[in-house]
Image (cartoon, grey):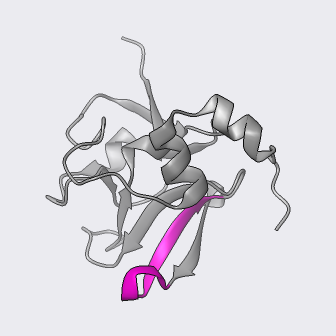
Amino acid sequence: MAREVDKPDAEWRRKLSDLQYRVTREKGTERAFTGEYWDVWDKGAYNCVCCGAPLFRSEHKFDAGCGWPSFWTAAEPDNVESAVDRSHFMVRTEVLCHQCGAHLGHVFEDGPQPTGLRYCINSASIKLEKNEG
């Protein structure tokens, strides 16, 4: 699939930390309760660490108890896409940045209302842009 933001692998490696690269470009994950944002409640926007696309907002974040930042909706639904993930002997719904194809995490149907969704997102795939003031 052609992406709006498409860079050679070497450029992604230069731009991202080792963990960010492993998570976003190689579909890795960070260990539960270790990511930068799993227990952060500052107000602001969570953007793609690779391309800066707006993905999630702090007002949609909730404590799912799973050890990863969790959101009940995407801030910009057109910037988030999903794909079937059959890795690790499971079938899950992978969440990707529509702009650059970065692996963000997975979405599950055990979240709060009004959506019933839990976007379980790796801290390494997002960057919090805090609200001023």
Could you say where residue 5 lies in the image, as x and y percent from the top left? 79, 45
Find out whether residue 73 is within the magenta segment. Answer: no
Residue 118 screen position, x and y as percent:
33, 66
Residue in front for this viewpoint, 104 or 73: 104
Height in image: 12 above or below 114?
Answer: above
- Lateral position of residue 31 relative to residue 88, left or right: left
Of the 4 image quadrants, the one containing the N terminus is: bottom right
User: Can residue 38 be seen in the rendering of this structure?
Assistant: yes
Q: Is residue 122 left or right of residue 33?
A: right
Q: Is residue 15 above or below residue 87?
A: above
**Count of residue discs:** 0
> Residue 120's image quarter?
bottom left
For this orientation, the residue located farthest to the right is 2
Classify the position of the C terminus by image quarter: top left
Q: Residue furthest top?
A: 133
Q: 128 or 15: which is nearer to us?
A: 15
Q: Is residue 40 left or right of residue 129?
A: left
Taking the view exactly as shown, the residue that stands out farthest to the left is 65
Which residue: 66% across, 59% down?
78
Residue 90 visible in the picture: no
- Residue 28 vs 85, above or below: the answer is above
Q: Is residue 90 left or right of residue 48?
A: left
Measuring 44% from the left and 61% from the top, which residue is drawn there? 105
Q: Which residues are magenta?
A: 86-97
Which residue corresponds to the image point at 35% horizontal and 71% vertical from the top-left? Answer: 117
Taking the spot 39% from the left edge, 57% from the top edge, the residue there is 29
Q: Nearer the viewer, residue 100 or 15?
A: 15
